[in-house]
Amino acid sequence: MKKSNKQDARRHCANWNGGKCLGAMMYREDGVLRFVLDKDKADKDCAVEKGCDYFDNIVIPGMNENGIQ
């Protein structure tokens, strides 16, 4: 798998907002989809190149399922 970059985030990440992160994070817990607003990420520069759990766990699997990567 290639290293993710801001171009990937711009094209595929729902949190991308002109280079800033909206901070909307989703995860599964006990079979339930949970949503939280991560104040540490919200309105900050996109950190996909440094590593982003949301991008790695939500966006990349979606890209892979759709043959994008």
Image: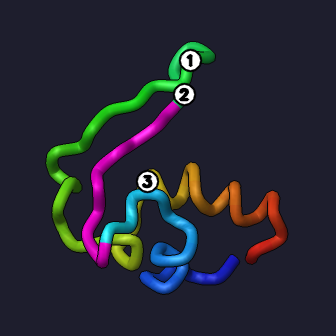
Q: Position of residue 18 (x, y in %)?
A: 30, 76
Colour mapping used in the image = rainbow
Q: Pointer 1 and pointer 3: residues touching (CB < 8 Å)? A: no
Quarter holding the C terminus is bottom right
How far apart are the alpha carbons under marks 2 and 3?
13 Å
Which residue appears at 32% of the width and 68% of the height?
17
Q: Residues within 10 Å of mark 2 (few under 14, many from 20)?
A: few
Which residue appears at 51% of the width and 21% of the height?
29
> Over which residues does the magenta segment extend?
18-27
Pick the residue in front: 28 or 24. 24
Residue bearing mark 2: 28
Amino acid type shown at disc 1: Val
Q: Pointer 1 and pointer 2: residues touching (CB < 8 Å)? A: yes
Amino acid type shown at disc 3: Asp
Helix, strand or loop for disc 3: helix
Residue bearing mark 3: 53
Which residue appears at 64% of the width and 82% of the height?
2
Q: Residue furthest top?
A: 30
